[in-house]
Amino acid sequence: MAYVTPLLTGVVEVVKKAALPLDRDFAELEQLQNSVKSIKNFVMNSYTKLEQTLKTELSKIRPDIPVFTTENKISGHSYFAISPIEGITNFAHGNPDFAICVALIENDKTVCGVIYNPAHDEMFFAGHGKGAYKEGPRNHERLRVSSAKEVAGSLVGFHVDSDSKTKDFLALQENILNSSANLRISGCVALDLAYVASGKLDATIGLNAHYASVAAGLLMVTEAGGIIRETSQKDTRDADMDAIKKTGNIAALNFACGQKFLSLLK
């Protein structure tokens, strides 16, 4: 399998190892009978342990580069960008829509990305120039974006960070709904991106997302034949990655009606 490099294999193995205690913790959440404070402490302990495992194990793969999480301001040109529990509010409520996200960026290029949902045992991964895939028991499934050609009737994911301006969210929501598209808010932008890559969503819009939460998913979308754009960029011929990292406002789209979606964002 030439598309699975040793580097990507190593990252996948790290994520699987880190996910084992998280999976157990998620199963225990349903059994907790304590206060909301106790649940919050339990969740944060799960997050902290997972973050430390990822940092330790990824440093063994590439000890020469730093590891940034969603709590950090990313700097430099080469680093790991990780979101230990993307969709942590879902996790805390026993909702299975959460994921572990890891992306390796070298010289400002995303080399590989992994998104893993342990609750459903869904492993998505991509390598630059190698395609995007979902792990299967025997063969890996090559991911392709949907072939929907019209916004009307399409299925659109939506992610809004708590710091986003309400008026921006409502304006975009109104434009999309008025176009006869269907909105879904899952609470996990990483899984939304993986679903765009696999054709389960035709597009997803994210506002104020941290780059560590979306780096792996953005690579998957492009490797699956889709396009990514910053929501307000004027020249839409190619992705403005600097703007995406600065604002966290992303549009991940299938290729067939990508430009039609972009017109709604204006």
Image: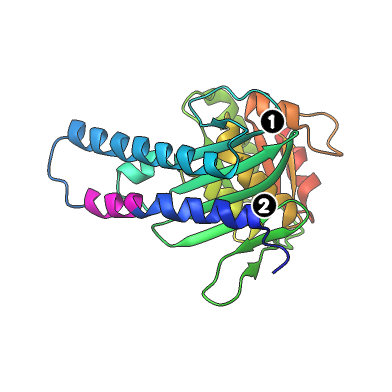
Residue beneath the point at 73% across and 54% down? 223
Circle 1 sits on which residue?
244
Residue 259 among magenta residues: no
Q: CA distance from mark 2 to mark 1?
A: 16 Å
Q: Quadrant of residue 79?
A: top right
In this rendering, would 53 be left or right of 161? Answer: left
Residue 27 among magenta residues: yes
Residue beneath the point at 64% across and 31% down? 249
Residue 76 visible: yes
Q: Position of residue 189 (x, y in %)?
A: 54, 43
Of 230 and 156, the residue lying toward us: 230
Q: Amino acid at mark 2?
A: Met
Compared with residue 37, is residue 142 higher up or lower down, i.e. above or below? below
Q: Amino acid at mark 1?
A: Ile
Residue beneath the point at 26% across and 55% down? 27
Which element type, helix, strand or loop, lies under badge 2? helix
Magenta stretch, residue numbers:
21-29
Q: Position of residue 18 (x, y in %)?
A: 41, 49
Compared with residue 249, is residue 93 higher up or lower down, i.e. above or below? below
Circle 2 sits on which residue?
220
